[in-house]
Image: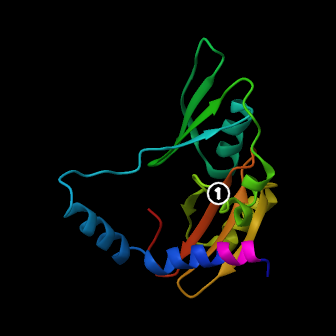
Amino acid sequence: MKLAKLATVFAVLTFVALFSPPAALETVVAAQSSNVDFDIMLDHVALSVPDIGQSITWYRKMFGFKEVRRGGQPNGMQTALIQRGDIRIELFQVPGAAPLPESRRNPSEDFRTHGLKHFAFRVEDIRAFLALLQAKGVKVVFELHDYPGAAFAFVSDNAGNAIELIQYKNNEPVR
């Protein structure tokens, strides 16, 4: 196994071992709230994409997202907010933006670059979900790894951004 791939598996396994919901999540929240007097929650993830229309269509077709709003700036930048339930993704299309480098498209290699690595969607049946996405033409960029506490894989969106799919084995339903 390549060293980069081994590092990726180790990083994800460490995460899964440390933060298997719901008990670990409650512990993390409780530990953080004792040090501060305010609450936070994730609001959205932002992605720069080469074609905003194609990305809106892709996220709608593959994951069921709906377009909430769309806008533009005088400099030609286009923006859109897509949402499914409590999950919101802000999309940007900027004229002249550099394409996503190949190393950022491969989760095993991307850990070698600082910055945001990926976002993850929790699913109830990862094997069925992967089969559904693959039937729709989605590219799997990191094959399914199945461990006692969780199973995970990475897919690539239409712009090359890494998306982790994860199934925790504690039988708690996805909300």
- Which scheme is used to colour this image of the protein? rainbow
Residue at 47%, 66% in the rendered image: 174
110 to 16, vertically: above or below: above
Residue at 65%, 82% in the rendered image: 146
Look at the image and give the residue range highlighted in magenta. Answer: 3-8
Residue 107 position by quadrant: bottom right
Residue at 70%, 78% in the rendered image: 6
In this rendering, the count of numbered labels is 1
32 to 13, vertically: above or below: above
Residue at 62%, 32% in the rendered image: 92
Residue where numbered disc 1 is placed: 163
Q: Residues within 10 Å of mark 1 (few under 14, many from 20)?
A: many
Quarter that holds the C terminus: bottom left
Across and down, in percent, residue 60 comes to 65, 43
Helix, strand or loop at label 1? It is strand
Between 84 and 16, the one nearer to me in the picture? 16
Magenta span main SS: helix
Say left or right for 97 vs 135.
left
Across and down, in percent, residue 51 comes to 74, 32
Q: Residue furthest top?
A: 74
Q: Does the magenta-highlighted stretch encompass residue 137?
A: no
Say left or right for 32 vs 112.
left
Say left or right for 4 vs 167.
right
Quarter that holds the N terminus: bottom right
Give, as a three-letter code, the residue at label 1.
Ile
Say left or right for 113 vs 29.
right
